[in-house]
Image (cartoon, helix red, strand yellow):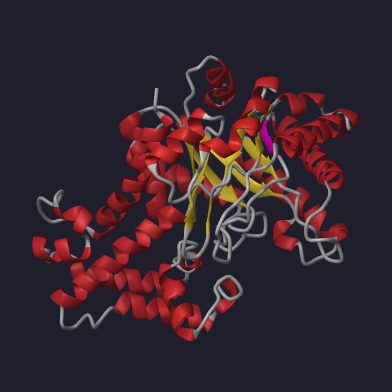
């Protein structure tokens, strides 16, 4: 199933580029939307988990890599998708969750996490040792990053051989955007220079060979660079192809690789298509998917407020505000401004930090309350037009809350599907 990933670089060289959407979310409705689209379209689906979200200690979702694979597998069975068509990827695997600790304690935890991912069946492994640990600079030099990446790769290789599993494909690189988007307003983002990308590739190659990891490096399919796309809390920086000409020309000298594009959320179909064409065929998306999910749920929240006097006004939004204020750890420091500005960002930011809260018991209860309220109630098309206008034209009869949310997520996935299948 990893053959599709191995074909990305040859396809670009042959003038027939294609892309693959990397779905970075652990929300069950988002996962269901992605798996359902895979059933409809055929081919493989790439599902990724991040180090903060899923790890051997549980992450913020409470799931280990094995539990995440089990969740996705169960949904795939319900949707009728052969599990052999699912590619599991691990994103930002490194010491990032423990960067407040010394490297001496953070790196062994990162090694244990990488081993857990490989044992669970993750075969696309993004190694990210770019962020400094306690008492280290925030940004490390390329040599140390490569040494730590090789250390993690060695664990992945040993684990794969130990379990007799597929040998991993690797994503490397030091120009790694902040997971989940920037935490401030952006005016412009400069792409990685060709010189910096060349240095990163050369240093990783040298270190991996020095550490006896030539075979692992031969399975490195992509490097993460900054193509000049990003989103902050309130704005999106669009892709400008003319700014990456020198960077993408580097791929002609390094035919083994393509580039992996992080933070492609909220880009247009045209921009995503250009990214695929120009050598960035792995398109990672996460916050935009849960942003669309939240849009749908909040639209239904308003509809329920209009249809049922017992529901209360915006019961779901009120509950989520209470939950986020009670524990601000997942948004405080990422959002800035007055109290009114913070309130708006908590619910409507492109960074979508609210996604960290949907799995909490009180949030699940609030969503269940919304679902129970709407169950069996016909929704007038006029209310759909008011609060969920994109759904109104497609509405032909009763539809569940979950289906409405899945459709909203799928609208985003369609955009990626068009860009990835441009040829």
Residue sitting nearer the eye, 306 or 106: 306
- Residue 111 appears at what percent x and percent y? 77, 48
- At 24% from the left edge and 83% from the top edge, which residue is drawn? 312
Q: Could you tell me what secondary structure mostly forms the magenta stretch?
A: strand
- As for residue 364 lying within the magenta part, the answer is no
Q: In which quarter of the image is the C terminus?
A: top left
- At 73% from the left edge and 45% from the top edge, which residue is drawn? 174
- Residue 116 appears at what percent x and percent y? 68, 46
Residue 213 placement: quadrant = top right
Residue extending furthest top?
A: 14
Specify whether residue 10 is in view.
yes
Against 395, residue 44 (above or below) is: above
Residue sitting nearer the eye, 197 or 57: 197
Number of marks in picture = 0
- At 56% from the left edge and 60% from the top edge, which residue is drawn? 186
- At 42% from the left edge and 57% from the top edge, which residue is drawn? 290
Residue extending furthest right?
A: 210
Drawn side of residue 36 relative to residue 253, left or right = left
Against 192, residue 10 (above or below) is: above
Drawn side of residue 114 relative to residue 103, left or right = left
Drawn side of residue 368 relative to residue 254, left or right = left
Residue 279 placement: quadrant = top right
Specify whether residue 255 is in view.
no
Residue sitting nearer the eye, 142 or 78: 142
Residue sitting nearer the eye, 253 or 291: 253
Against 92, residue 42 (above or below) is: above
Tell me the magenta residue range: 168-172
- Residue 406 appears at what percent x and percent y? 31, 51
């Amino acid at each position: 199933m990893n053959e599709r990933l191995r074909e990305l670089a040859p396809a670009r060289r042959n003038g027939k580029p294609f892309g693959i959407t990397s779905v970075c979310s652990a929300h069950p409705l988002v996962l269901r939307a992605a798996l359902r689209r895979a059933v409809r379209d055929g081919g493989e689906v790439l599902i990724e988990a991040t180090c903060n979200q899923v790890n051997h200690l549980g992450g913020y979702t409470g799931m280990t890599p094995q539990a995440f694979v089990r969740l996705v597998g169960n949904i795939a069975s319900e949707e009728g998708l052969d599990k052999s068509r699912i590619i599991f990827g691990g994103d930002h695997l490194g010491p990032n969750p423990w960067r407040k600790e010394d490297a001496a304690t953070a790196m062994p935890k990162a090694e244990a996490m990488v081993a857990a991912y490989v044992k669970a069946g993750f075969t696309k492994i993004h190694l990210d040792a770019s962020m400094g640990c306690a008492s280290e600079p925030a940004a490390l030099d390329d040599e140390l990053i490569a040494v730590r990446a090789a250390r993690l790769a060695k664990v992945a290789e040993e684990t794969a051989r130990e379990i007799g599993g597929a040998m991993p494909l690797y994503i490397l690189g030091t120009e790694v955007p902040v997971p989940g988007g920037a935490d401030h307003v952006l005016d412009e983002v400069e792409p990685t220079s060709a010189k910096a990308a060349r240095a990163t590739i050369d240093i990783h190659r040298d270190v991996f060979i020095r550490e006896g990891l030539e075979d692992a490096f031969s399975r490195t399919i992509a490097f993460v660079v900054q193509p000049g796309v990003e989103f902050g809390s309130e704005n999106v920086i669009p892709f400008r192809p003319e700014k990456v000409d020198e960077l993408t020309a580097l791929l002609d000298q390094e035919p083994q690789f393509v580039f992996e594009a992080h933070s492609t959320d909220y880009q247009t179909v045209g921009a995503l298509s250009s990214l695929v064409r120009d050598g960035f065929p792995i398109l990672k998306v996460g916050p935009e998917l849960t942003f669309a999910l939240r849009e749908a749920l909040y639209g239904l929240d308003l509809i329920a407020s209009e249809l049922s006097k017992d529901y209360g006004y915006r019961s779901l939004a009120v509950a989520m505000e209470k939950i986020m204020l009670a524990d601000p750890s997942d948004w405080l420091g990422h959002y800035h401004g007055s109290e009114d500005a913070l309130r708006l960002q908590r619910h409507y930011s492109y960074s979508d930090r609210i996604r960290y809260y949907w799995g909490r018991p009180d949030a699940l209860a609030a969503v269940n309350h919304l679902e129970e309220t709407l169950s069996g109630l016909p929704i007038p098309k006029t209310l759909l037009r008011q609060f969920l206008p994109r759904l109104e034209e497609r509405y032909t009869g009763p539809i569940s809350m979950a289906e409405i949310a899945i459709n909203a997520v799928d609208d985003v996935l369609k955009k990626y599907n068009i860009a990835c299948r441009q040829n």
